[in-house]
C-alpha cells in the first residue's frame, strides 16, 4: 500500500491543490486541525503582508464523506484569496477585457536565488512569472494540508510529529536587524517524531531507506540547503566510541546520536531531523540581474517578500516528515480499512520486545 502526494497550483492562481492517494478508509479528519496547521504556516516572525491577505482554509473535493476518508484519492484545495487581485494576470484561460490588476506586465529581470532564470531558459519563457508562480513557497500550503492528513493517520498508531525553529530568540533579533537593513535571513529548523516503532523504512533497497526519504522530503522544500539526521554533520568529527548509541537492557538506548534511524530503518528512538534554510532571496534592496529580453544589467524584481520564514519552514518540515513517516507506515502495516492498519501495527508491537520510551 503506497501513500502518494501530488500537488498543483500557482502562487497567485485560483488555488493550491493536493491529492493524497493510498489512505485507508475510515480515517476521521478534523477540518479545524488542518486549518490550524495552515494558520501556523502563515505565522512567524518576519513574514510579509501576503500573510494578512491569505487566511488559508482547506476544502475537500473528493475522497471524504461526513469527515471520514473513503479509501479513494483525497483532493484537498486551499484557495488563494489574493487571486482576486491577479484575476486578469493569472487567469488560467485567455483573459477577457482590458488588462487590469497585478501580474499584467511581464517580468524580465530574474531574481538570483529563485527559479526565475533557470526556469525561463528551461521552459522557453518570455515572462519569468511563468516560472516563479509555481516555484514560490506558497506551494508549501499544499504540503502542510497533506501533512495534517498524514498526522491524523499517524496519530492512530500513536506517532506524533512536531517541528520548531531552532533558537527562536536569536532569530527574532536577527530578523529585526536584517529588516532595518532591507536584508533577509535564514535559520535552522528541527523536526522530532515520537512513538515511531523500529522497522519503518528498509535497507533492502536504496530508495526505501527512511533516512534518504526524509532527507529528500526536507530538501525538496523551498530554501532548504542542508539536512541532517541526529547528530549529522557533527558525527564526521567524532570518534566511533562516542558516535553511536549503545544497546542497553530492554533494547533501549541511553543516547540518540543516530536520530532514531540506523541503516535506513527506524530503531525505535525519537526521530530527529534538522534542516538549514538559506536567507530568502528576494531582498527589498534588490540584487543585481540582467534583463532577459535586452541583456542589459538591472536590478532584480522586488516581489512582496518575507524577511524570514524559518518558523513557517518548521511547520512545512513537520508536514514533510509526517508525510514520509505516514508513507513508511502504510508500507509496513497496509490495510484498506483503518482498523486493518491499526490491527497490523498492534500485532507487530506484540511480536517485538520494543517498548516506547518517549
Ligand atoms: C515557508 C517559506 C516561505 C518563503 N517565503 C519567501 C519569500 O517571501 N521571499 C523569497 O524570496 N523567498 C521565500 N522563500 C524561499 C523561496 O521560495 C526559495 O528560495 C526559491 O523558491 C528558490 O528555491 P531554493 O531556495 O530551494 O533553491 C520561502 C520559503 C519557504 C519554505
Image (cartoon, grey):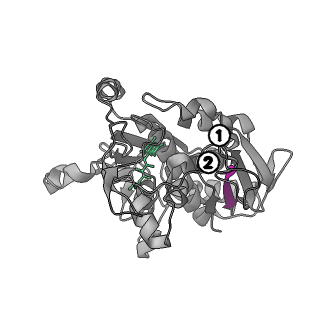
Q: Is residue 188 left or right of residue 201?
A: left
Percent position of residue 237, x then y: 13, 52
Q: Is residue 227 left or right of residue 96?
A: left
Q: Is residue 105 left or right of residue 204?
A: right
What residue range appears in magenta?
13-20
Tell me the residue at 66%/55% (across/down): 18
Of 216 and 106, nearer the camera is: 106
Q: Disc 2 or 1, which lies upstream in sequence?
A: 2
Q: Which mark is residue 185?
A: none
Mark-to-mark CA distance, 2 and 1: 6 Å
Instruction: Report helix, strand or loop for mark 2.
Output: loop
Q: Main secondary structure of the magenta part?
A: strand
Q: Is residue 2 above or below residue 324?
A: below
Q: Which mark is residue 12?
A: 2
Q: Is residue 317 visible?
A: yes
Asked if the beta carbon under badge 2 is closer than 8 A to the nearest atom of ligand 1, the reply is no
Q: Is residue 195 visible?
A: no
The residue labelled by disc 1 is 82
Of 37 and 175, nearer the camera is: 175
Percent position of residue 148, x then y: 62, 44
Tell me the residue at 40%/48% (across/down): 250
* Magenta run includes residue 14: yes
Tell me the residue at 64%/42% (across/down): 101
Percent position of residue 327, x then y: 58, 60
| 2 and 1 marks in contact (CB < 8 Å) | yes
Percent position of residue 272, x then y: 39, 46
Q: Is residue 86 above or below residue 51?
A: below
Of 288 and 235, nearer the camera is: 288
Of 112 and 88, nearer the camera is: 88
Is the N terminus in the top left, top right, bottom left or bottom right quadrant?
Answer: bottom right
Asked if the beta carbon under badge 1 is closer than 8 A to the nearest atom of ligand 1, the reply is no
Instruction: Report helix, strand or loop for mark 1.
Output: helix
Amino acid at each position: 500500500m503506497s501513500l502518494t502526494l501530488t500537488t498543483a497550483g500557482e502562487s497567485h492562481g485560483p488555488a493550491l491543490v493536493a491529492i493524497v492517494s493510498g489512505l485507508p478508509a475510515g480515517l476521521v479528519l478534523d477540518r479545524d486541525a488542518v486549518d490550524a496547521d495552515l494558520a501556523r504556516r502563515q505565522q512567524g516572525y518576519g513574514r510579509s503582508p501576503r500573510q494578512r491577505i491569505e487566511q488559508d482554509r482547506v476544502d475537500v473535493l473528493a475522497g471524504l464523506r461526513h469527515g471520514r476518508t473513503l479509501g479513494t484519492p483525497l483532493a484537498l484545495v486551499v484557495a488563494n484569496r489574493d487571486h482576486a487581485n491577479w484575476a486578469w494576470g493569472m487567469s488560467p484561460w485567455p483573459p477577457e477585457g482590458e488588462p487590469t490588476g497585478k501580474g499584467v506586465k511581464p517580468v524580465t529581470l530574474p531574481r538570483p536565488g529563485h527559479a526565475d532564470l533557470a526556469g525561463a531558459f528551461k521552459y522557453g519563457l518570455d515572462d519569468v512569472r511563468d516560472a516563479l508562480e509555481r516555484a514560490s513557497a506558497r506551494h508549501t500550503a499544499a504540503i502542510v494540508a497533506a501533512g495534517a492528513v498524514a498526522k491524523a493517520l499517524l496519530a492512530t498508531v500513536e506517532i506524533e510529529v512536531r517541528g520548531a525553529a531552532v533558537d527562536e530568540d536569536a532569530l527574532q533579533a536577527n530578523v529585526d536587524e536584517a529588516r532595518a537593513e532591507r536584508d533577509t535571513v535564514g535559520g535552522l529548523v528541527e523536526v522530532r517524531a515520537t512513538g515511531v516503532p523500529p522497522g519503518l523504512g528498509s535497507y533492502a533497497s536504496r530508495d526505501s531507506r527512511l533516512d534518504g526519504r526524509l532527507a529528500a522530503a526536507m530538501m525538496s522544500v523551498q530554501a532548504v540547503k542542508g539536512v541532517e539526521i541526529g547528530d549529522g554533520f557533527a558525527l564526521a568529527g567524532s570518534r566511533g566510541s562516542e558516535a553511536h548509541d549503545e544497546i542497553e537492557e530492554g533494547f533501549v538506548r541511553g543516547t540518540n546520536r543516530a536520530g532514531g534511524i540506523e541503516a535506513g530503518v527506524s530503531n525505535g528512538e525519537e526521530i530527529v531531523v534538522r534542516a538549514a534554510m538559506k536567507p530568502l532571496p528576494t531582498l527589498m534592496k534588490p540584487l543585481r540581474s540582467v534583463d532577459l529580453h535586452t541583456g542589459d544589467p538591472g536590478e532584480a524584481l522586488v516581489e512582496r517578500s518575507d524577511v524570514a520564514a524559518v518558523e513557517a519552514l518548521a511547520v512545512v518540515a513537520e508536514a514533510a516528515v509526517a508525510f514520509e513517516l505516514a508513507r513508511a507506515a502504510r508500507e509496513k502495516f497496509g490495510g484498506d480499512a483503518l482498523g486493518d492498519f491499526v490491527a497490523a501495527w498492534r500485532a507487530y508491537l506484540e511480536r517485538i520486545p520494543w517498548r516506547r520510551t518517549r
